[in-house]
Image (spheres, helix red, strand yellow):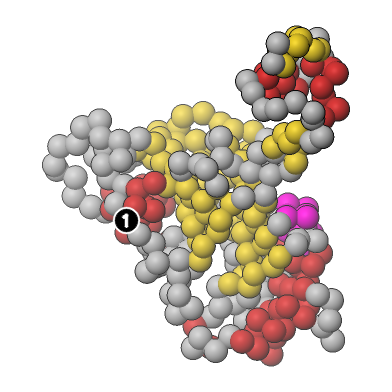
């Protein structure tokens, strides 16, 4: 399971922390000024995901990298067109006359140029100049042992990115009459290589892997969608649904109340009901409204209710 924690209070800019179970690394999605983030969480982050560089989504990148300066490894930053130069400008704004050794952090920025096209850059102290380091193609922008991340580009008056975090699928053994042992790892390895002719020693009794595959069941990994600022139109909804279809959780912006739809349209944001509709179209199991405008001074109960009514098909 992926545990997702909102690290920003209602009156703070948005920030989410994602932690897969039994996985050393964690992830930050959106760099709002989040008082709930700890120093340890910042240091343990393997990748940061930024939907777009409006100030309320990017202002705390400085505070996060402040705690990463001596982690001695790569941290990946993923984001929309232009993000490499925007990260560079953040880092280059400081004075770096002190010496840094192999314990210094370095960043790999993965910039989405278009759907399925990602340019990689490496940034190192002291110049932090983005040096091109290859391209990525395909659906996934990031993958490690704990999570695979896919994305969709949305319209917010500027390109913005929706993210889907997916745990790897797991092989479960059901109804097998033998007690556990090293044979389980051998059988799973044969399954993953699609080898039906592997001989598996089950407590001294040799069996072909093809005989044992019937006891294996592949269980999909937990999936979490994060959809921040987006205009409330059908093209965005279709892209959200395609990316997040059937996800276990979806965190989605509810920036404006329904009665402020004119403001939403003027600023290319969504409203409570339209975000609820988008979540319903995606067929997610649980939908969590987040990122409310400060104009409501934390009084967002009615916005949440309107969102949930729409999510459950009760609007209007």
Percent across and percent down for residue 277 are 78, 72
Q: Nearer the viewer, residue 47 or 79?
A: 47
Asked whether residue 113 is in view, the answer is: no
State the residue lying farthest toward the left: 98
Image quadrant assignment for residue 249: bottom right
Percent across and percent down for residue 295 are 51, 87
84 part of magenta stretch: no
Asked whether residue 283 is in view, the answer is: yes
Image quadrant assignment for residue 9: bottom left
Query: From what the image shows, is residue 256 above or below residue 230?
Result: below
Instruction: Tell me what residue is drawn at x 52 percent, y 43 percent.
Output: 22
Percent across and percent down for residue 39 are 32, 56
Query: From what the image shows, is residue 199 above or below residue 303?
Result: above
Residue holding disc 1: 39
**Which SS does the magenta portion mostly show?**
helix
Q: Nearer the viewer, residue 148 or 31?
A: 148
Instruction: Tell me what residue is drawn at x 45 percent, y 32 percent.
Output: 132
The quadrant in which the C terminus is found is bottom right
Label 1 CA crowd tier, 10 Å (few <14, some 14–19, many 20+): few
Instruction: Tell me what residue is drawn at x 82 percent, y 34 percent.
Output: 175
Q: Magenta part of the protein: which range?
A: 237-247
Percent across and percent down for residue 125 are 27, 39
């Amino acid at each position: 399971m992926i545990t997702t924690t909102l690290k920003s209070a209602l009156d703070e800019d948005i920030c989410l922390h994602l932690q897969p179970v039994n996985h050393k690394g964690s992830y930050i999605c959106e760099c709002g000024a989040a008082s709930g983030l700890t120093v340890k969480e910042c240091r343990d982050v393997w990748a940061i995901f930024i939907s777009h560089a409006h100030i309320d989504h990017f202002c705390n990148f400085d505070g996060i990298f402040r705690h990463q300066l001596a982690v001695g490894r790569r941290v990946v930053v993923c984001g929309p067109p232009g993000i490499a130069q925007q990260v560079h400008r953040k880092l280059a704004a400081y004075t770096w006359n002190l010496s840094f050794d192999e314990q210094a952090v370095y960043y790999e920025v993965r910039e989405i140029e278009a759907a399925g096209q990602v340019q990689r850059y490496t940034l190192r102290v002291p110049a932090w100049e983005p040096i091109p380091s290859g391209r990525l193609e395909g659906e996934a922008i990031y993958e490690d042992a704990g999570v695979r991340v896919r994305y969709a580009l949305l319209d917010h008056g500027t390109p913005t990115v929706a993210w889907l975090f997916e745990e790897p699928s797991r092989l479960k053994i059901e109804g097998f009459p033998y007690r556990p042992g090293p044979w389980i790892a051998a059988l799973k390895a044969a399954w993953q290589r699609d080898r039906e002719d592997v001989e598996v020693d089950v407590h001294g009794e040799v069996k072909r892997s093809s005989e044992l595959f019937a006891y294996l069941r592949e269980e999909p990994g937990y999936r979490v969608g994060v959809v921040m600022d987006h205009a409330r139109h059908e093209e965005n909804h279709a892209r959200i649904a395609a990316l997040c279809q059937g996800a276990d959780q979806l965190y989605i912006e509810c920036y404006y109340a329904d009665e402020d739809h004119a403001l939403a349209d003027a600023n290319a944001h969504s409203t409570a009901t339209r975000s609820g509709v988008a979540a319903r179209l995606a067929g997610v199991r649980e939908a969590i409204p987040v990122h409310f405008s400060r104009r409501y001074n934390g009084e967002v109960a009615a916005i949440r209710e309107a969102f949930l009514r729409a999510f459950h098909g009760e609007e209007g």
